[in-house]
């Protein structure tokens, strides 16, 4: 019996090695046949888990926020703060509107005054030239220019320029000469 027991023990040691080889060969054959499907399946599961993890904290935050917002004291404080900020913004807007209205009234008053000045000057037979300062400046400019002619004036072209000569401006080489266009059809053929 001892021999049978030893043989039985030896047989128990051998089959696990054979089972692992069988398992290895079956896994290898499955991977060789369905490998890409398994890779894509693993990637899909991974992306699904990541997506669910991102959404879960939002749900927790929103539920905790709803519990906090249920507190009546905090709700009242939040509404009062919101109302105060709205009131402040409305006051700022009202101040800007009043300032704009004043500016528009000043501009209208200035236009009305200019129209009255123009009407008065036309009654007297003078031409209207805008502000009085502008009129004085233009009168001084015209009187000063009529007294002395400008001597620092440059001539428009060289003295040796002749439009019929064909060169570009007084014997300088003539690289920019005008040439007539080609005759005939533009597309050839």
Image (cartoon, rainbow, N blue to C red):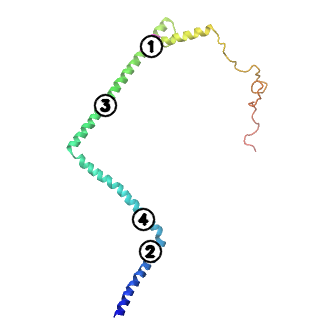
SS label for mark 2: helix
Q: In the image, residue 77 lies at what x, y percent?
A: 23, 39
**Which of 16/148 is in front?**
16
- Earlier residue among tags 4 and 2: 2
Q: Label 3 vs label 4: CA separation?
A: 57 Å
Quarter in which the C terminus is drawn? top right
Identify the residue at image location x=40%, y=61%: 46
For discs 2 and 1, the disc positioned in front in the rendered view: 2
- Using the image, tell me which numbered label, if any, was put on residue 27: 2
Q: Position of residue 70 (x, y in %)?
A: 22, 47
Query: Closer to the N terminus: mark 1 or mark 3?
Result: 3
Provide the residue designation for mark 4: 42
Left or right of 139? Residue 112 is left
- Bounds of the magenta span? 112-118
**In whole angstroms, how far apart are the C-alphas of marks 3 and 2?**
73 Å
Choose the circle earlier in sequence order: 3 or 4.
4
Q: Secondary structure at mark 3?
A: helix
Q: Is residue 150 above or below residue 28?
A: above
- Residue 93 placement (x, y as % from top left): 33, 29
């Amino acid at each position: 019996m001892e021999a049978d027991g030893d043989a039985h023990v030896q047989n128990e040691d051998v089959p696990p090695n054979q089972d692992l080889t069988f398992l290895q060969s079956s896994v290898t054959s499955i991977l060789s046949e369905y490998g890409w499907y398994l890779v894509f399946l693993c990637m899909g599961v991974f992306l699904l888990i990541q997506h669910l993890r991102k959404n879960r904290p939002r749900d927790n935050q929103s539920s905790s926020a709803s519990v906090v917002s249920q507190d009546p004291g905090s709700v009242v404080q939040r509404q009062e703060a919101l109302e105060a900020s709205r009131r402040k913004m409305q006051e700022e807007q009202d101040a800007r509107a009043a300032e704009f209205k004043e500016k528009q009234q000043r501009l209208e008053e200035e236009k009305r005054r200019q129209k009255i000045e123009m009407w008065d000057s036309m009654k007297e037979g003078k031409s209207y030239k805008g502000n009085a300062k502008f009129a004085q400046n233009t009168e001084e400019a015209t009187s000063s220019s009529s007294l002395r002619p400008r001597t620092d004036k440059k001539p428009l072209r060289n003295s040796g320029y002749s439009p019929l000569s064909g060169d570009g401006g007084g014997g300088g080489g003539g690289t920019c000469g005008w040439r007539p266009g080609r005759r005939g059809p533009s597309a050839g053929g």
